[in-house]
Amino acid sequence: MKQEIKFRAWRDISNSKFENATEVYRHTPKGMLTNLFQKLSSRNELKGYGTLSFTLGDFQTWAMNNSEFLRLFNLWVADDYSKKSKPSVDRINPYKGYEFSNMQWLSWNENYLKGVAEVSEKKHKPIIMLKNGVEIGKFKSVKDAQYFLGLKSNGDITLVLQGKRNTVNGYAFRFEDKQLLEGKQ
């Protein structure tokens, strides 16, 4: 009963905000979830994970029974349907596709920031710093080594890693994982 009242209130708010029937529908839980399901389905196939293992009905049931989705949807409505606060499905493990055990609700902004951090983390290739052939340091990335040495750019370190230069300020560098080649991972 309480949930029905909330759904009616959300529908009424959507009706008062939008004139176009499609826009009204997309700003109700069912409409937002239908639109999101289509995006998840497309993204899952595009990333090579195949078709979703659940139906639109399964997805809607999963969402409507999830208190975090309901909380985020309520915040989205209260925030005048701001993109940043819109409910968004996050893949907990970004190397797996959309499946209920790998999905959680975040606001669009939280999911965006998480994605930026994951991409940044994927780009980190640990490197080893050597002096006269002896390992003296390890860095999470070329950028970290650049800051440590006080260099204006990381170009010279990259040249050492590519084998085009021997040292930078007397230090040699190599990737921690010897199979890594600059630009490939």
Image: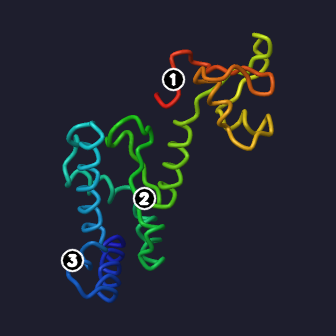
Q: Specify the amino acid type for callout 2.
A: Ser
C-alpha separation, residue under disc 2 versus residue under disc 3: 26 Å
**Whole-percent x and y of residue 97?**
33, 39
**Whole-percent x and y of residue 125?**
58, 29
* Residue at the spot of label 2: 67
- In which quadrant of the rendered view does residue 36 lie? bottom left
**Cβ–Cβ under 8 Å for marks 2 and 3:** no
Residue in the image at 25% along x and 66% along y: 30
- In which quadrant of the rendered view does residue 12 lie? bottom left
- For residue 181, the mark is 1
Q: Residues within 10 Å of mark 3 (few under 14, many from 20)?
A: few
Residue in the image at 47% along x and 67% along y: 85
Q: Secondary structure at mark 2?
A: helix
C-alpha separation, residue under disc 2 versus residue under disc 1: 46 Å
C-alpha separation, residue under disc 3 versus residue under disc 1: 50 Å
Q: Mark 2 or mark 3: which comes first in sequence?
A: 3
Which of the two marks, 2 or 1, is nearer to us in this view?
1
Q: Specify the amino acid type for callout 3.
A: Thr
* Residue at the spot of label 3: 22
Q: Specify the amino acid type for callout 1.
A: Leu
- Extreme residue in the top direction: 133
**Whole-percent x and y of residue 164?**
61, 23
**Whole-percent x and y of residue 144?**
71, 36
Q: Residues within 10 Å of mark 2 (few under 14, many from 20)?
A: few
- In which quadrant of the rendered view does residue 70 lie? bottom left
Q: Quadrant of the N terminus?
A: bottom left
- For residue 104, the mark is none
Residue in the image at 62% along x and 28% along y: 159
